[in-house]
Image (cartoon, rainbow, N blue to C red):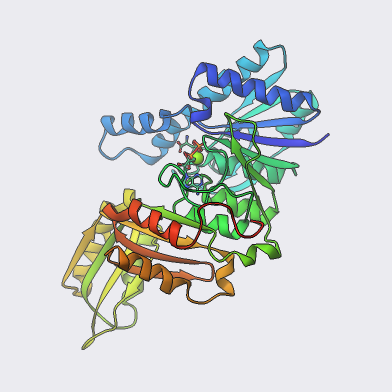
Amino acid sequence: MPIIVQKYGGTSVGGIEKIRNVAKRVIESYNEGNKMVVVLSAMAGQTDGLIKLAHEMTEDPDLRELDVLMSTGEQVSVALFAMAVKSMGYDACSLLGFQVGIHTDQLYGKARIHEIDTRRILKELEKNRITTVAGFQGLDSRGNITTLGRGGSDTTAVALAAALNADICEIFTDVDGVYTTDPNVCPKARKMDKISYDEMLEMASLGAKVLEIRSVEFAKKYNVPIHVRSTFSRERGTMVVAETRDMEKVLVSGVAFNKNEARITIRKVPDRPGIAVKIFEPVFKAGIVVDMIVQNTSEEGITDLTFTVPKPDFYKTMKLVGSVAEEVGAEKVLGDEDIAKISIIGVGMRTHAGVAQKMFGTLAKENINIIMISTSEIKVSCVIEEKYTELAVRVLHEAFGLEGEPSEDH
Ligand code: ADP
Ligand code: ASP
Ligand code: MG
């Protein structure tokens, strides 16, 4: 019997009636002859509410206890869902991360899944139970509850699909697929029928939160087909799959943006071996992910170093970098939270030139200043002032012909 993993996000389970509807939908798939594993997020707004509570208690909540608190949101959803299924005359069983055996490392708030024990789930499925698993949570080797980072229920779902060798992982959300850009920002965004793992990986890492990045990493690594679709309609959504040759014909397949990074500049750093490692070591040790790094050409042995970090890590990084900057004799550290990163993505860039130039020209025409640039094989990113984000997304979307019908089968 095929195994299907379905994941429903916060808005999909945002109330009693909505959870009932999810239960009905899952039962339909069950009645079609599938074994069902259902991963749920916390009800919409719950995780934010829990984080707010923690910060009302103390300015700097203990990370272990914060994970214990945050993981409760998903516990509520799975319990209510299992009750709904049972009230409809079917058997169900809710499981928390630790009951399944979702083993992670020890990094509270952004733990990585190491291994999943599938025995308990398989036992429940054998008993013909619709098995629901709390998303976003795991257990470290010392027996502590961990969480996987915001949006982490996607990762739970895809990792479970890989571990169970499921036929498909369906991600049910509040939009009906992956679009050329965020449809809530650009009304002309177009739904894609399919997108490659690599493109989706870039889209996710560059800010398109429709799928959490680690979920796409898992999917690519274990070749799990993902179907992103709407909880509120029956329409086919977007398949996230391995690259096919026709995908290369499309130059740019999407525009992403991220307002969740901040920029830090260290002015007048001595330019000598060992300085970069000295500056970044405490930042990396604190588990902070540094994204773009730009070092100016040095003049008389002195240079400027600029990089970006996630906004929630901004103050911590400023503090850490502030002390090393003083140590190495830099002039000062400047910070800017009002930035956004705009990116264009497409596997077609591998074989076509001039994409970056068109991007720069399009932004220039709107008088949008580019603060930082980074490129990879299949993406170009520019940091700009945050207030121009929506404008930049719209003009780039238009400039690369992403509106209307696709010119190729993509
Ligand atoms: P869930 O709660 O179901 O996990 P999320 O809010 O995490 O849902 O992700 C869905 C949201 O992702 C959409 O409402 C949309 O605003 C946003 N989004 C950003 N970029 C894209 C994109 N390229 N395609 C579709 N949705 C996108
Ligand atoms: N509830 C968690 C969050 O809001 C995880 C998730 O929804 O995927 O980030
Ligand atoms: Mg999400």
The C terminus sits in image quarter: bottom right
In the rendered image, which quarter is residue 290 located in? bottom left
Judge whether 407 appears above or below 18 on screen: below
Residue nearest the viewer, comparing 74 with 17: 17
Q: Residue at x 25, y 67 (%)?
A: 265
Q: Is residue 149 above or below residue 66?
A: below
Q: Give whichever of 192, 295 is nearer the camera.
A: 192
In this rendering, would 310 be left or right of 128?
left
Residue lying at the far left in this picture: please name it: 331
Q: How many marks?
A: 0
Residue 254: image location, x then y, percent: 51, 57
Residue 90 percent coordinates (x, y): 72, 16
Where is residue 129 shown, x and y percent of the image?
74, 23
Picture coordinates of residue 176, whole percent (x, y): 57, 38
Q: Identify whether 261 is placed above or below 325.
A: above
Quarter where residue 196 is shown: bottom right
Going by the picture, which residue comes out furthest to the right? 1
State the quadrant of the N terminus. top right
Which is more toward the observer, 324 or 367? 367
Residue 286 visible to an observer of this rendering: no
Which residue: 55% across, 70% down?
A: 349
Q: Residue at x 56, y 55 (%)?
A: 200
